[in-house]
Amino acid sequence: MKGEVRELKLTVNGKPYELKVKPNTLLVDILRKHLKLTGTKIGCLDSACGACTVNIDGKAVRSCSVLALQANNREVITIEGVADGDKLHPIQEAMVEHGAIECGFCTPGMVMSARALLAENPSPTREEVREAIQGNLCADEGYVKYIEAIEIAAEKMRGGQ
Amino acid sequence: MADAKLNVGEYSILGKKMPRVDAKAKVTGQAKYAADYEFPNMLWGQIKRSPYAHAKILNIDTSKAEKLPGVMAVTTGKDFNGFKWGWSGPTRDEEPFATTKVRYQYEGVAAVAAIDEATAEEACDLIEVDYEPLPGVFDPFEAMQEGASLVHEDRPGNICVEYHWNFGDVDKAFAESYLVREDTFQTPRMAKGYIEPPAVVAYWPEPDRLVFQGAKGSPYFPYRILARCFNLPLSNVRIIQPFIGSDFGGTKNDMVHCDFAAPMLAKKTGQPVKLVYTQFDELSTCLRRHPMWITIKTGVTKDGILKATYVKAIADGGAYTRMSPLTMFLVGTCMTLPYKLPNFKYDAYNYFTNNPSSAAMRGHGLYHSRFGADVQLDMIAEELGLDPVEIRLKNAIENPKPGEVYETVNEVHVATCGIKECIEKVAEAVNWKKVKGQKKVEGSKAYGMGFAAATYNSGTKLSAHNACAAIIRVCEDGSVNYLTGASDVGQGSDTITCAIAAEVLGIGLEDIDLKRVDTAFTPVDPGSYGSRVTVHAGEAAKKAAEDAKRQLLEVAAQQFGVKPEDVEIKNKQVFVKSNPEKNMPWQRLVRTACYETPGKVIIGRGYSTQGISMYGLADFSKGAGDIGTNYSFTAQASEVEVDVETGVVRCTDNSVIAHDCGFPLNPLAVETQCQGGAYHQGVAAALYEEFKMDKGQTLNPNLIDYKRPRACEAPMTRVEHVITNDPYGPFGAKEASEGSCCTAPPAVINAIYNATGVWIKELPAQPEKVFWALKNKREKGQKQG
């Protein structure tokens, strides 16, 4: 039935949650409105801009394109869960140092797409980097510094292993 | 890229790559944008919009909506008591909500506040509006017809803006020219393209005090407009600025319906009201770049020296005036740069239509005319058998000697100009001497290189009223608050102004804490437009820091028993210049100043003084004079790959921009700005973006059908710095990057010609257009063959 509340169990940024949600609720609304994790942005709700990208079980997923219930029993990481306390993740560090960030609205989604890429493929080619972030629209920065920052982070992460 | 070469030794911070002051907040998701704010008892608002592009409003019945449980208030245009607003006093032609007539599709007619979004949406559906549809005009050529339906009854002929300028004697010069060419170019109807749609939360902490937190890149526009709208003293309007998800002019400069709806509904309910636009709202109703038809007639000598240019520009202004008077000024004003041009004539016509309003967009105005002019220059070069680089260098204006100023025929004043060096640098970077004349074809792919050059007015100052200020508050522990009215919408100006303050004070960038705009505390500022922030807010920052430093140096001089001019601060050490052994740490100096009798409070103040005061206010109707304080210059070389079977064009990574921004205060930010400006607002216009319209209806109001440039096609553009140290900018700086929005379209179109021999004069060069152009060329060739 439309509107009937269902149980949802998931972990977000390592914390377990048990929520009651309507079946038509989007994952992005759970994150932003219920858990107040507003680092995940809403740009289009059409799965076109990628600003709402999160990681579900390590994969980059646009959180406006999945229902909250589809994340049942899964592990969600949002931008708030990427850094280790005050210590930035190498992807974040490279984006800051390399001047990739302008207005910052697409940045959380960009970080999450890059994080999923490097978890699966530690040595991506430039074309693979481009492909990994092609679902993330940026409006002002031209992608050049983002692409280079992800390559810098990949190299640093490989070196650290 | 190396740090800027000149001057860098003199500075501790400026001219070196610096990460941005707000980057960590943004990369961790901590930076809050307008839609991220929530308040207790907050209501959600929604706009009721007209399905018609042009219709009389006969009646609005809100009774059913008001009775819906959960609805707390409904507002219509009548609540605003005839209030109208506009970009300037004489152009106030827009109501917060249409009361008697709608002039474009989805114009707002009412708004609702309810306990949640779904209820607000349902309530909007229950508002009943009776319309009498009217015939509309949907492009300037329809609008200019005799007897055409009028968008504004008091504006005969649907004329929104009309200018006629004439400098020198173009007719005589055409008669004397060896070659005269006339071509018509068209620029597309484009979205602003930022990802963050408009959003706002407003509340009234007291009945006569308004707080407004909205996605506004020029927060002092709503400050003034809302004060007038709600009859409040400016002191009672508090605009608190969240982080802004980009702004390229227009929508986030001034007002959209939600910016009036939220304060009105909050006033009615006594509760905070939040409205967030969808991307559909943004793309179907918000401001766009003007579509423009530009006819350019140019006369040259046998050697390719420009003698005269006549430009006729026809623009679709949309439903309301907005910034069109400025747009049409900008289309004309820089036609006399970056090339020497002794005779220039300009006729501009901007028409009202029943389309969403047009307005400023990155590269404002110049982008249209520089596109046409720089493509036509390549056409002329070809006819004369000249090289595209050679014809540009021949005509480029020289860098004036220090102390001298180059004046154009329309009285634009340039103190520094690195355009020749820019053109030479890009030609060298792509190895033009070696590769020119070589045809590169691989299978169905043809490759070509294109060049373009442009200027952009920097430090725009439309009136004396456009001054800005800064306040430096030195705290007793040595930390510093920097208060500014300026807005960083992504361009990096917060970092620059903080760096200027730190440089002057002799402390670190990390010691400066920037306070974002809160009109209750920060000084007034015109906002982020016209590439003005670094030049003007930067000057204000410099002066405020110098004022604070002067006060501290007096204390230091007293301590050391020397004169204040004998003391300096560097790297957080205060020392006697002639005897550096005599020194103390910055923190101790500040403590001494604050704690020792009589005890000082160190506040530095500064305001901008450069700009129009030098030569007087530009005359929009005659076209003479500056609105820029100084002028940046850009040259670009771009290689394209054209699939001659499908018409798909792609920019390759062989792409270089050389940019004269005077002095790159943060070379890293200048590079990012140029790469982004060239791609998102330049290549996008050249190859991808265009709203498809059908009688006022936007057919592709989403980011799937409206193609925007993505990472997979992004050229890895390199940026070279050309340093000219402009005397009118802080530390020699001029604007960075708006010029690259103007060089990318002509460079790409020239490259397509270089690859295939077809000219695309109507942007964007989408595959179908290129396919047919190539097919026509082939068939013509076969016939002739």
Image (tube, coloured by chain):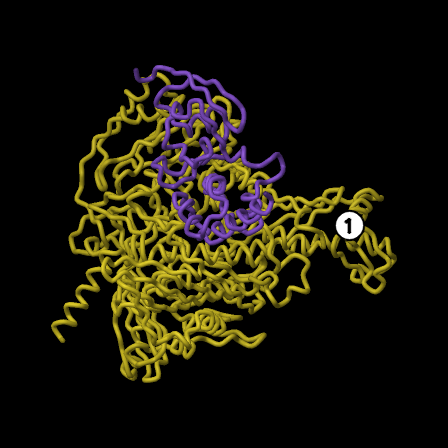
Chain colours: A purple, B yellow
Judge left or right: residue A55 versus residue B147: right
Residue A74 position in % (x across, y down): 45, 25
Residue B311 in sight from this viewpoint: no
Which residue is outermost to the left? B783
Q: Nearer the viewer, residue B203 or A146?
A: A146
User: Which residue is depicted at the point 47% across and 37% down?
Assistant: B214
Amino acid at dot 1? Trp
- Is any atom of residue B516 visible in this view? yes
Report the residue at 81% width, 57% height from top.
B575
Which residue is situated farthest in the right direction here?
B561
- Residue at the (48%, 62%) spot, across then down: B718
Q: How many marks?
A: 1
**For the residue labelled by badge 1, is the local secondary structure a helix, a strand or a loop?**
helix
**Quadrant of the image occupied by residue B374:** bottom left
Across and down, in percent, residue B531 comes to 48, 56
| Res. A56 image quadrant | top left
Query: Which chain is home to disc 1?
Result: B
**What quarter of the picture does the C terminus of chain B occupy?**
bottom left
Specify whether A78 is left or right of B365. right
Q: Position of residue B122 (x, y in %)?
A: 30, 24
Left/right of residue B271 with respect to residue B158 in the rendered view: right
* Residue A148 to residue B700: above or below: below
Percent position of residue B484, x then y: 59, 47
Residue B125 higher or lower than B690, as above or below: above
Of B454 and A42, nearer the camera is: A42
Of B309 and A114, the residue lying toward us:
A114
Residue at image mark 1 = B586
